[in-house]
Image (cartoon, rainbow, N blue to C red):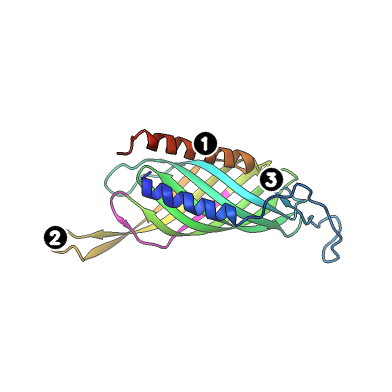
Amino acid sequence: MTVRATATLTAVLTASLLAVTPPDASAQDKPDHAAPAQDKPGHGLCWRGKPECGSFVITEMGALYRLDDYPFQGDPSRIYLTFDAGFMKNLSKRHAVGLTGYALAGGDISRLGIRPRYRRWLSHNSSVDISPGILVSGEDPAFDYDAPGFVFGASLNEGDLVALTLETEYARYREYGDPPNVSQYQSRSDWTIRGGAKLGSALGLAGTAALFALFIYVASTGAFD
C-alpha cells in the first residue's frame, strides 16, 4: 500500500465516521402507527446493529483473498484489506438500508468508493447484507485505473461482530503506448472475485485503529524511505 493511497483511504474513512451522530445506547421503542407494533424498530442510534434499533453505525474491517488469477503480466498480491464506514437505518425489524464509504488496499492496488447497502435480518443476531457500489478511484501497478469501477458484495453477519463475505469487482484500465505513441492507449478490463471475513462494530473499529497505528509506527522508522 502506497503512502498516498493510505492517506487518501484514511481521509475517506474519517469523513464517513464524522458524518455519523454519536451512538445512543438507549434505543427506546416509541409509538408508530405506520407499522405493526411487533415489527416496528425503535428510534435510537446504536453502535452495534440490532433489529430493534432505529439506526446503527457500520465500522467494518475485512481481509479478502483473490480467488481467480490476475489476467495481465505481473503477480500482484492476492490478499487485500477492506474498510467500510457509514450508517444504516432499520425500516422494520426485518429490513434496513444505508450507505458506507468503501476502501480496499493490497500491495500496490487500492480502491476507493461508496456502497449503498441493504440488510435482511434473519434473527436478532444474524443478518445478510447486499452492497453494490461504485468505485471512484484506484491504483494499479501495471496500468492507469479508469474510473468508475463497480463492486458487488454479499455478507453473512453474526452479532454484527464477525461476517463471512464474498465480493466481485469490475475494473477498467488504460494501457498507454511506448514513445512516440504515449498519448495513445488501449482499454482493458478485469473481473475479479474475492472471499474472506470481516470484523464489525467495535471489533472492526479496533482492528482499523490498530492497523493505522502500526502503519504510523512503521512510517516513523523510515521504512518507506
Amino acid type, residue under disc 1 in the picture: Ala
- Asked whether residue 142 is drawn in magenta, I would say yes
Q: Quadrant of the N terminus?
A: top left
Residue under the image location 26 percent in, 47 percent down: 73
Disc nearer the start of the sequence (1/2): 2
Q: Position of residue 217 (x, y in %)?
A: 43, 34
Residue under the image location 58 percent in, 42 percent down: 205
Disc nearer the start of the sequence (2/3): 3
Mark 3: few, some, or many residues within 10 Å (few <14, many ≥20)? some
Amino acid type, residue under disc 3 in the picture: Arg
Name the residue carrying label 2.
Answer: 179
Disc nearer the start of the sequence (1/3): 3
The circle drawn on residue 210 is: 1
Q: Position of residue 99 (x, y in %)?
A: 59, 58
Regarding mark 1 in the picture, which secondary structure is present there?
Answer: helix
Q: Quadrant of residue 164?
A: top right
Q: Is residue 12 above or below residue 197?
A: below
Nearer the observer: mark 2 or 3; the answer is: 3
Regarding mark 2 in the picture, which secondary structure is present there?
Answer: loop
Amino acid type, residue under disc 2 in the picture: Pro
Name the residue carrying label 3.
Answer: 48
* 156 to the left or right of 5: right
Residue range (magenta): 141-154
